[in-house]
Amino acid sequence: MAAILGLGINEGSYLTEAVRGGIVSVDRGQIEAAHTLGMSPARTMSRIILPQTMRLILPVLGNSAVGMLKFTLLAATIAMPEMLNAAQRIYFINGAVIEMLFVCAIWYLAGTTVLSIGQHYLERLFGRSAGRRA
Protein backbone atom coordinates (compact mmCIF):
# COMPACT_ATOMS: atom_id res chain seq x y z
CA MET A 1 0.00 0.00 0.00
CA ALA A 2 2.88 2.36 0.79
CA ALA A 3 4.41 1.77 -2.66
CA ILE A 4 1.12 2.47 -4.42
CA LEU A 5 0.58 5.65 -2.43
CA GLY A 6 4.17 6.84 -2.79
CA LEU A 7 4.45 6.24 -6.52
CA GLY A 8 0.91 7.44 -7.18
CA ILE A 9 1.30 10.71 -5.30
CA ASN A 10 4.70 11.37 -6.86
CA GLU A 11 3.55 10.74 -10.43
CA GLY A 12 0.22 12.46 -9.84
CA SER A 13 1.82 15.68 -8.72
CA TYR A 14 4.37 15.62 -11.54
CA LEU A 15 1.78 14.94 -14.23
CA THR A 16 -0.65 17.49 -12.80
CA GLU A 17 2.01 20.15 -13.27
CA ALA A 18 2.74 18.91 -16.80
CA VAL A 19 -0.95 19.09 -17.77
CA ARG A 20 -1.33 22.51 -16.17
CA GLY A 21 1.69 23.76 -18.11
CA GLY A 22 0.21 22.39 -21.34
CA ILE A 23 -3.12 24.10 -20.76
CA VAL A 24 -1.46 27.41 -19.85
CA SER A 25 0.66 27.25 -23.02
CA VAL A 26 -2.40 27.61 -25.26
CA ASP A 27 -2.58 31.17 -26.54
CA ARG A 28 -5.13 33.30 -24.70
CA GLY A 29 -6.34 34.73 -28.02
CA GLN A 30 -7.67 31.35 -29.10
CA ILE A 31 -9.72 31.05 -25.94
CA GLU A 32 -11.10 34.55 -26.43
CA ALA A 33 -11.94 33.75 -30.06
CA ALA A 34 -13.84 30.64 -28.98
CA HIS A 35 -15.84 32.65 -26.44
CA THR A 36 -16.53 35.27 -29.12
CA LEU A 37 -17.98 32.53 -31.32
CA GLY A 38 -20.32 31.59 -28.47
CA MET A 39 -18.60 28.39 -27.32
CA SER A 40 -19.20 27.37 -23.74
CA PRO A 41 -16.17 26.95 -21.48
CA ALA A 42 -16.54 23.14 -21.57
CA ARG A 43 -16.75 23.10 -25.37
CA THR A 44 -13.76 25.47 -25.60
CA MET A 45 -11.77 23.13 -23.38
CA SER A 46 -12.69 20.01 -25.37
CA ARG A 47 -12.46 21.46 -28.89
CA ILE A 48 -9.74 24.11 -28.66
CA ILE A 49 -7.53 23.74 -25.60
CA LEU A 50 -7.21 19.97 -25.03
CA PRO A 51 -6.23 18.97 -28.60
CA GLN A 52 -3.37 21.47 -28.54
CA THR A 53 -2.44 20.50 -25.00
CA MET A 54 -2.36 16.78 -25.83
CA ARG A 55 0.15 17.37 -28.60
CA LEU A 56 2.43 19.08 -26.08
CA ILE A 57 2.06 16.78 -23.08
CA LEU A 58 1.99 13.36 -24.78
CA PRO A 59 5.78 12.98 -24.71
CA VAL A 60 5.74 13.75 -20.99
CA LEU A 61 2.90 11.29 -20.36
CA GLY A 62 4.59 8.54 -22.36
CA ASN A 63 7.93 9.01 -20.66
CA SER A 64 6.21 9.06 -17.31
CA ALA A 65 4.43 5.77 -18.04
CA VAL A 66 7.72 4.13 -19.01
CA GLY A 67 9.37 5.61 -15.93
CA MET A 68 6.59 4.30 -13.70
CA LEU A 69 7.13 0.83 -15.12
CA LYS A 70 10.79 1.11 -14.21
CA PHE A 71 10.14 2.70 -10.81
CA THR A 72 8.17 -0.33 -9.69
CA LEU A 73 11.57 -1.82 -8.96
CA LEU A 74 11.70 0.58 -6.02
CA ALA A 75 8.69 -1.22 -4.59
CA ALA A 76 10.92 -4.27 -4.12
CA THR A 77 12.73 -2.43 -1.31
CA ILE A 78 9.55 -2.31 0.74
CA ALA A 79 8.60 -5.93 -0.01
CA MET A 80 5.76 -5.33 -2.44
CA PRO A 81 5.22 -8.39 -4.63
CA GLU A 82 6.74 -7.39 -7.92
CA MET A 83 8.31 -9.08 -10.94
CA LEU A 84 11.89 -8.86 -9.70
CA ASN A 85 10.88 -10.22 -6.27
CA ALA A 86 9.12 -13.14 -7.96
CA ALA A 87 12.24 -13.83 -10.01
CA GLN A 88 14.38 -13.74 -6.85
CA ARG A 89 12.13 -16.27 -5.13
CA ILE A 90 12.35 -18.58 -8.13
CA TYR A 91 16.11 -18.37 -8.56
CA PHE A 92 16.70 -18.93 -4.84
CA ILE A 93 14.87 -22.23 -5.30
CA ASN A 94 16.32 -23.45 -8.60
CA GLY A 95 19.63 -21.56 -8.76
CA ALA A 96 19.05 -20.19 -12.27
CA VAL A 97 19.97 -16.59 -11.42
CA ILE A 98 21.07 -15.30 -14.82
CA GLU A 99 18.20 -16.97 -16.64
CA MET A 100 15.57 -15.45 -14.36
CA LEU A 101 17.11 -11.97 -14.54
CA PHE A 102 17.23 -12.31 -18.33
CA VAL A 103 13.50 -13.18 -18.36
CA CYS A 104 12.79 -10.09 -16.20
CA ALA A 105 14.81 -7.92 -18.57
CA ILE A 106 12.82 -9.25 -21.53
CA TRP A 107 9.52 -8.50 -19.77
CA TYR A 108 10.63 -4.98 -18.91
CA LEU A 109 11.82 -4.47 -22.48
CA ALA A 110 8.49 -5.73 -23.83
CA GLY A 111 6.54 -3.44 -21.50
CA THR A 112 8.56 -0.34 -22.36
CA THR A 113 8.41 -1.18 -26.07
CA VAL A 114 4.61 -1.48 -26.03
CA LEU A 115 4.28 1.81 -24.14
CA SER A 116 6.73 3.55 -26.50
CA ILE A 117 4.91 2.32 -29.61
CA GLY A 118 1.58 3.48 -28.19
CA GLN A 119 3.12 6.86 -27.37
CA HIS A 120 4.49 7.16 -30.92
CA TYR A 121 1.08 6.57 -32.51
CA LEU A 122 -0.66 8.97 -30.12
CA GLU A 123 1.93 11.68 -30.81
CA ARG A 124 1.48 11.13 -34.54
CA LEU A 125 -2.32 11.36 -34.17
CA PHE A 126 -2.26 14.57 -32.16
CA GLY A 127 0.63 16.05 -34.15
CA ARG A 128 -1.24 15.81 -37.47
CA SER A 129 -2.75 19.27 -37.22
CA ALA A 130 0.61 20.84 -36.37
CA GLY A 131 2.16 19.19 -39.42
CA ARG A 132 -0.44 20.71 -41.74
CA ARG A 133 0.31 24.22 -40.53
CA ALA A 134 4.06 23.87 -41.00
Image (cartoon, rainbow, N blue to C red):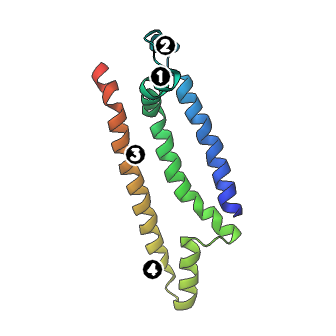
* Residue sitting at x 46%, y 31%: 56
* CB contact under 8 Å: marks 1 and 2: yes
* Residue sitting at x 69%, y 64%: 1
Task: Identify which residue, 94 or 63, lies in the foreground.
Answer: 63
List x then y, in percent, for residue 78. Answer: 70, 68
Q: Is residue 5 left or right of residue 34?
A: right
Type of amino acid under label 3: Gln
List x then y, in percent, for residue 94. Answer: 52, 90
Type of amino acid under label 4: Glu
Above or below 63: residue 40: above
- Give the residue at mark 3: 119
Q: CA distance from mark 3 to mark 2?
A: 32 Å
Disc 2 residue crowd, few under 14, some 14–19, many 20+, Cα 10 Å: some
Q: Secondary structure at mark 2?
A: helix
Q: Earlier in the sequence, mark 3 or mark 1?
A: 1
Asked whether residue 128 is in view, the answer is: yes
List x then y, in percent, for residue 18. Answer: 57, 35
- Quarter occupied by the C terminus: top left
Q: Earlier in the sequence, mark 4 or mark 1?
A: 1
* CB contact under 8 Å: marks 3 and 1: no
- Give the residue at mark 1: 44
- Give the residue at mark 2: 35
